[in-house]
Amino acid sequence: MEPRVTDRPEKSRYEIVADDDGAETAGFAEYHLSEGEIAFIHTEIDSRFAGRGLGGLLARGALDDARDRGLRVLPYCPFIRGWIGKHPEYTDLVPEARRARFGL
């Protein structure tokens, strides 16, 4: 089974599931949603799933969903901020006036 990223709005987070039966969450990216903006505040991958590139897949999935929904991204989470820094095609999601604050 391919890893799958799902928005769980009742938990205010995106989750990535990576096991074969789809029952175990491998990691998550917590967010706060407000008036057309999504602020990512914390990302975590369970150590049992480390080294598989799941953090990057989670970031890409969450940011692609934010783009599809027309949300502006505020990357307070160091992992999401760093991932955007390595993938400049996602920088446009961060409001231009706030990019300097995030080092983007």
Image (spheres, grey):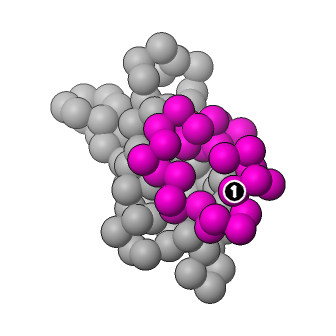
Instruction: Give above or below for 25 relative to 99.
Output: above
Residue type of the residue flagged with mark 1? Arg
Q: Can the viewer see residue 11? A: no
Q: How many marks?
A: 1
Indicate the quadrant where residue 72 lies: bottom right
> Horizontal and vertical percent for residue 88?
49, 43
Magenta stretch mostly in which secondary structure? helix
Instruction: Give above or below for 69 relative to 27.
Output: below
> Horizontal and vertical percent for residue 52?
41, 18
Q: Nearer the viewer, residue 65 or 9?
A: 65
The residue sitting at 55% across, 43% down in the picture is 84
Instruction: Give above or below for 12 relative to 19.
Output: below
Relative placement, left or right, of 69 versus 1 is right
Relative placement, left or right, of 102 versus 33 is right
The residue sitting at 50% across, 73% down in the picture is 71
Quadrant including the N terminus: top left
Q: Residues within 10 Å of mark 1 (few under 14, many from 20)?
A: some
Q: Nearer the viewer, residue 19 or 83?
A: 83
Secondary structure at badge 1 equals loop
The residue sitting at 57% across, 48% down in the picture is 29
Q: Which residues are magenta?
A: 76-104
> Horizontal and vertical percent for residue 77?
70, 46
Q: Nearer the viewer, residue 53 or 8?
A: 53
Residue 102: within the magenta?
A: yes
